[in-house]
Amino acid sequence: MAGLYIETFGCQMNEADSQEIADRATAAGYVVVAEPREASVVVLNTCTVRDNAERRAYGRMQHFRALKRADPSLKLVVCGCLAEQDRERIPGVAPHVDAVFGTSELARLGDALAAWRPEFRTDGKTEERLLVDSLGGKADCIADAFSPLRAFVTVQRGCSYYCTFCIVPHVRGRFDHRPMPEILSDVEVAASRGAREVMLVGQTVNAYRDSATGADFADLLERVVQLDCVERLTFVTSHPKDCTEKLARTLGAHAKLNPRFHLPVQSGSDAVLRRMNRKYTVADYRARVAAFRKHCPGWALTTDLIVGFPSETEEDFAQTLLLCEEMQFAQAFMFVYSPRRGTPAARWEQIPAEVANERLHRLIEVVERGIRAYHAKKTGTVVRALVQGPSRKDRAKIAAKTMDNVTVIAPASGTEQERFVALPWIDVAVEDSRVWGCSGRVVGLAANFDAEAEKVYPRDVIDLIHVA
Ligand code: SAM
Ligand code: F3S
């Protein structure tokens, strides 16, 4: 059997593309595998949004060099944003890479997979290769029994906003919104394959426009929640500029929507936002959040923040800290500005790395206080969460995500975990919380989000029953 192994770096757009690659591969007769040792083709779906993502992708290319040496029949493919950006460079740096496909070439990648398919032997891998396979780390891959529970559906490709720090418009092009009927059909297909949660993805989903009807993102959400097959719906990423009162009202009106809103602010200083070309002021952001909070009380508000942007002063940074204190974000992705070749800000005078890193630490301290407080409120309650799979740190525990996107983990034996495939909604009695999420015990299992849980007795109670 020809196996396809995919590693995905970066944002949900790449996750969505990886799903599409997996679909094309399956149609061409491949099986998507969870281990490189089982693969005939390895796909690295890369990211270049920050320097460390780029370095990681090159690191993984070098890692697979040893595997190719041990088994020259293995094909190594690089796609995604780094492939688009470094199309010319990759063959020089990693000559063992068999093919490079840009962000708009998924169909060509599918054709190549189909063309290679007859080349792969059906017998096992060489001893030498099995040995090499066991070396080295592993990134996110998409194949396990729990992965079909979540599906990504792309609503738009590219971005036309050209923030001065961002590489995305350069490697993915300008907005290309998909027709609404195509999106609805993809959602139905995802649900028919077992998706319990559909995530609509795009760089700026709330700028969505259906060119045939002029329908906007709120209209799209209305249509998707009306599909009976959709159990839970969520979306990323939104831009503050396109947050309308209509969108906030729509979010608050539908119980199928996960109560989380990701709204990157990037900075709390108007001067910095202007230089970033973010197209809103801090006052605009506050007003959008106020409208959102009015219509969606109790929802989690999450964000992205950049520190050390060229010419960010201590005063600018202090305003970011103040805004974070005020907003109490439930989660935040915090980054040191990373100059990206070809973007305007990369040509400007840079902030010294030690200043930027020191600001990042101060920011993390402030933001994490809010996150801890948000998570602490769950202690002593029972939360319903959708399973993700065994915890990466301890496979004797199950990891799941609540509807407001908080990670919860709880002990679960291998046989217990097998049951979660059919009963993927778990009720967890939260006993403790940390900055990464919450921990507790599984007290119930359900087949559907709205269904009453089948009770699970904790192990100490079962022991007591046995003793009695
Ligand atoms: N479209 C989204 C938006 O409007 O906010 C963001 C997409 S970007 C892939 C995800 C996040 O990466 C951004 O919100 C930003 O915080 C961060 N980011 C992008 N370029 C960056 C850079 N050059 N340096 C540091 N962080 C960056
Ligand atoms: Fe990048 Fe700004 Fe678009 S962060 S993806 S250019 S909204």
Image (cartoon, rainbow, N blue to C red):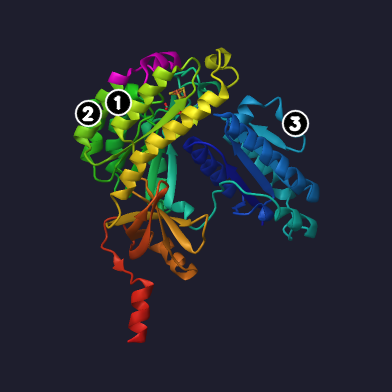
State the image coordinates of residue 251 (x, y, percent, origin top left): 26, 36
Q: Is mark 3 within 8 Å of ligand 1?
A: no
**Which circle, 1 or 2, is nearer the viewer?**
2
SS at circle 2? helix
Mark 2 or mark 1, which is nearer the start of the sequence?
Answer: 1
Viewer-proximal residue among 181 and 86? 86
Viewer-proximal residue among 19 and 400? 400
Identify residue type, mark 3. Answer: Val
Circle 3 packing at 10 Å, graded few (<14), some (14-19), many (20+), is few
Residue behind mark 1: 243
Left or right, 156 with reference to 249: right
Looking at the rendering, the stretch of residues picked out in magenta corresponds to: 268-283
Identify residue type, mark 1. Answer: Cys
Q: Quadrant of the C terminus?
A: bottom left
Circle 1 packing at 10 Å, graded few (<14), some (14-19), many (20+), is many
Identify residue type, mark 2. Answer: Ala
Task: Work out whether 384 lies above or below 257.
Answer: below
Q: Residue drawn at (59%, 44%), measured in percent from left and top? A: 7
Residue behind mark 3: 93
SS at circle 3? helix
Task: Work out whether 65 lies above or below 282.
Answer: below
Q: Is residue 5 visible?
A: yes
State the image coordinates of residue 25 (x, y, percent, origin top left): 59, 46
Cα separation, mark 1 vs mark 3, equals 43 Å
Q: Quadrant of residue 243?
A: top left
Image marks 1 and 2: residues in contact by CB distance under 8 Å: yes
